[in-house]
Image (cartoon, grey):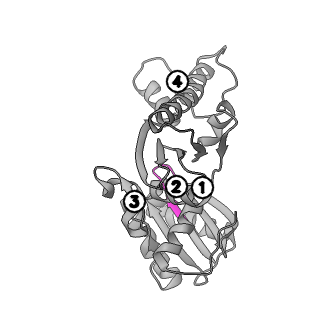
Amino acid sequence: MLLAIDVGNSWTSFGAFAEGVSQGFAGCETSLLRNAATAITALDSCLVELGIGPGDFDCVLASVVPEVRQWLVDRLWDLTSKAPLELKAAGDVGLTVDYEHPETMGSDRVANALEAIGSCRLPAIVVDCGTATTFEVLTPDGALRGGPILAGIEVSLQALSSKTSLLPQVGARAALSPLNRSTADAMVAGAVLGHAHAVVGLVGAIEVELGSECEVVLTGGLGGLIAPHCPGRFQYDPHWTLRGMVRAFERLSGPTNLALES
């Protein structure tokens, strides 16, 4: 069994894979893993949900939160008596990055790119909607180019309430219409529908610059909120990053019998 763990700023995702085929997914708020009082319970609950016990799994880890990364490395060592394979830099997995400082490219973005190379017709764009919304642009020859980075939907809503005197705190949720009869619904519509239009517009601008239509994938915890408001050719896969991490594991560990499901 292979356990893939993607630690984001707000949410940590877990995926279990056997011979490349997904066996289940789980997740928890990253804040629970930052707190010593809740970290072990949060991790163990996710492992139980996935049916994984101590010592019977390999692990691949990607983290953009350094303090959580170190705790997980130590805890996984306790559970398996071996260190997880870590996806840290594009060069580690043989990915060509057309970026001024490739080492600053987040490991989750590298995983997204690997899955696009393995699953998409290139050129392709992966839009990962989380705390930030990132665009991973894959050129026809499989190089990763840096795309735009936007403040995420929840960050936008938090900024509205924290920087104004009267606007309330509102969580991210589905938006049905741009016409609303309450301030909270109006804020959600602006954040979600505005974000969807920004994503569609930026994808179009990228395609113009590349001179080619791209295959487009939406992922991330908030990708499902904007997917209904995007063109039908945009596919949504909430577990895209975890699948890319399985591909990273293959490259980091050498030839294996893992063969990703198509």
Mark 3 surroundings within 10 Å by alpha-carbon count, few (fewer than 14), some (14 through 19), many (20 or more): some
Residue drawn at (64%, 18%) of the image: 178
Kindly indicate whether the residue at mark 1 contacts the one at mark 2 (C-beta within 8 angstroms): yes
167 w.r.t. 47: above or below: above
- For the residues labelled 2 and 3, the Cα–Cα distance comes to 13 Å
Q: Nearer the viewer, mark 2 or mark 3?
A: 3
Q: CA distance from mark 2 to mark 1?
A: 7 Å
Element type where label 3 sits in the image: loop
Find residue 50 and report its image quarter: bottom right
Q: Label 3 belongs to which residue?
A: 96
Disc 1 versus disc 4: distance between alpha carbons? Answer: 33 Å
Q: Which residues are magenta?
A: 5-13
- The mark found on residue 168 in the picture is 4
Amino acid type of the residue that numbered disc 2 sits on in the rendered structure: Asn
**Residue displayed at 41% across by 65% down:** 69
Q: Which residue is mark 1?
A: 240
**Viewer can see residue 146:** yes
- Indicate the quadrant where residue 58 lies: bottom right
Predominant secondary structure, magenta span: strand
Q: Would you name the residue on which mark 2 appears?
A: 112
Q: Secondary structure at mark 4?
A: loop
Q: Could you say where residue 36 lies in the image, as x and y percent from the top left?
A: 44, 64
Choose between 154 and 222: the one closer to the eye: 222
**Residue type, mark 4 in image:** Pro
> Comparing marks 1 and 3, which lies closer to the viewer?
3
Task: Determine the CA span between mark 4 and mark 2.
Answer: 34 Å
